[in-house]
Image: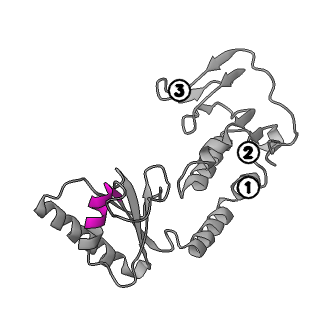
Amino acid sequence: MRAPVLPRSARTRSPPPARGDHRTPGSASVVTSVPAAPALVVATPGAEPRADGGYAAAVLLDGWVLLGRPSLRAAEEALRRWLNAAALVQPGPAGGEVIVVAEASLPVVQALIRWDPAAHAERELAERYTLRFPPAVRMAAVSGPERAVAALLAAADLPPDAEVLGPVTQDGAAAPAGNGAGRAPADTVRMLVRMPRSGASALAGALQAAQAVRSARKDAGPVRVQLDPAELI
């Protein structure tokens, strides 16, 4: 897979081998800055120290790890981290170079190459309207033992335009159909309730009231309710 080089760079070349210090900042060893001297800095995303005068080059590795997360905000978060790291590099006219190891045709990588997060945000919003994902709609995720989740939704006085999706199991697979004695209920499932944003207060109120009913009855099984979760499954 070819790593695209950002236009901030005046030349396409590999970073020179480090001659000097080697630093590895991370959660166990916080390094906030490094001097303007030859060094190789290996940092986890978000823990990049500032370099006096800016870095000569940066290589953004393992793009697939950030982009492959099962989250609505995976691309958004990846772009944010990439931009923050690239901003620490010297500008192209000064010789700075940034390389990202990811598929160049991906929209999020193109947004990085063009240095255009606004266009990426507009694209993401348009896609979410098409798919009816937050923030285009209001979404509630109800997670817990299958019977407890079903009981909470049955007790909830949901608005007429609420759409119930699922359930899916903890590993993201659809739960087997049917609730008879032929199968055991899943240990943990998630169901989604989707509706227009105009009914956000009604949805939140209905789920809160249903939780209160479960609590008063001391129903077994913890049920978690999240509004507009980043992880849908």
Expressed as whole percent of the image width and height from the top left, the position of residue 81 reads 60, 45
Residue 31: image tag: 3
Residues packed near mark 2 inside 10 Å, few (<14), some (14 to 19) or many (20 plus):
many
* x and y percentages locating residue 170 in the rendered image: 43, 50
State if disc 1 and disc 2 touch (CB < 8 Å): yes
The answer to whether marks 3 and 1 mark residues whose Cβ atoms lie closer than 8 Å is no
In the image: residue 230, left or right of residue 61: left
- Residue beneath label 2, please? 102
Q: Which residue is mark 1?
A: 106
Alpha carbons under labels 2 and 3: distance apart: 27 Å
Residue at point 58%, 72% (across, down): 131
Give above or below for 143 relative to 159.
above
**Would you say residue 146 sits in the magenta stretch?**
yes
Seen in the image, is 17 located left or right of residue 52? Answer: right
- The residues colored magenta run 143-151
In the image, what residue type sits under mark 2? Ala
Task: Give the residue displayed 32% in from the left and 55% down from the top.
Answer: 144
Gap between marks 3 and 1 measured at Cα = 32 Å
Specify the color scheme. Answer: one colour
Res 130 quadrant in image: bottom right
Label 2 to label 1: alpha-carbon separation = 8 Å
Count of numbered circles in the view: 3
Report the predominant secondary structure element of the magenta stretch. Answer: helix
Res 184 seen here: yes
Please indicate whether residue 90 sits to the left or right of residue 139 in the image: right
Q: Quadrant of the N terminus?
A: top right
